[in-house]
Amino acid sequence: MSKLLLIEDDPLVQRGLQLALGRHGHDLSVASTGEEGLQKFHNAPPDLVVLDVMLPGINGFETCRRIRQASCTPVILLTARNDDFDIINGLEAGADDYVVKPAQPTVLDARIRAVLRRSESTHESIRVHRELHIDTTSLTVTLRGTPVPLTPTELRLLLTLSRTPGQVLSRQQLLELVWEHDYLGDSRLVDNGIQRLRAKIEDDPANPEYVQTVRGFGYRFGPL
């Protein structure tokens, strides 16, 4: 079930969409102004925001810009205004899609699911851990926007660890997953590989932030 935040000032539209999108399996919370919507967004980040343009106080375009400054959460603008100028403004504000009222709930549900699929696909291909970005499609790594050159083994090690942040992987598991070895005597390969990787992605390899040692067990990827 996806968690949606609807920012809409018309109580009839609010109630109608709550019922209709609830039937399509979405869990909706509602805000009536841009200010209230931003507060709810920061208190309980949703999977997607459905945002009216004509709102009291800050309008939908500005609300969308503020959401986009803080997050990559997808936003669908929902409005009766359908001229090209408004559509361009909405997309330039960071919206992912633009739906014109009155919209059939089945159509809106389809647009929501399509945007969520695109968002999930992007998130899966780029892993962001604070200032470290790992693009699993292009197989590139950047730290604060600067490319980090890694050897194939170092890259496989980083991809393996970052796939499950917080999960401890033993040296034996890393040998099998990264080096495809099953002889525990080769565990020094893991320690040496970890040291080389830390030297490239950690500010202080002696106090690592990303590749952490769990004494007596192995390694895990942070930050937690």
Image: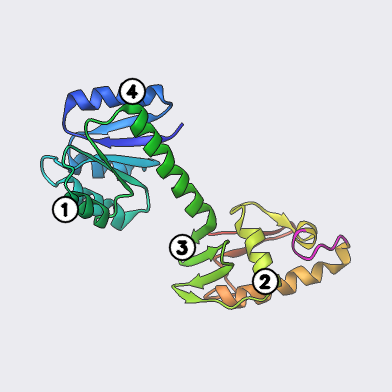
The residues bearing labels 4 and 3 have C-alpha atoms spaced at a distance of 38 Å
Q: Is residue 180 above or below residue 74?
A: below
Residue drawn at x 57%, y 62% as measured from the top left: 137
Closer to the chain start, of discs 3 and 1, is: 1
Q: Where is residue 108 in the image (x, y as percent from the top left)?
A: 34, 33
Closer to the chain start, of discs 1 and 4, is: 4
Residue drawn at x 70%, y 60% as measured from the top left: 215
Residue drawn at x 74%, y 70% as measured from the top left: 191
Residue 154: mark in rendering: 2
Closer to the chain start, of discs 4 and 3, is: 4
Closer to the chain start, of discs 2 and 4, is: 4
Q: Mark 4 points at which residue?
A: 20
Label 1 packing within 10 angstroms: few (<14), some (14-19), many (20+): few
Q: In this view, does 121 lie to the left or right of 174?
A: left
Residue 85: mark in rendering: 1
Q: Name the residue under label 3.
A: 130
The residues bearing labels 1 and 4 have C-alpha atoms spaced at a distance of 29 Å
Magenta part of the chain: 177-182
Local secondary structure at mark 3: loop
Local secondary structure at mark 2: helix
Is 192 included in the stretch rendered in magenta? no
Amino acid under label 1? Phe
Which numbered disc, 2 or 3, marks the residue closer to the eye?
2
The residues bearing labels 3 and 1 have C-alpha atoms spaced at a distance of 36 Å
The residues bearing labels 2 and 3 have C-alpha atoms spaced at a distance of 19 Å
Amino acid under label 4? Ala
Q: Is residue 178 above or below residue 224?
A: below
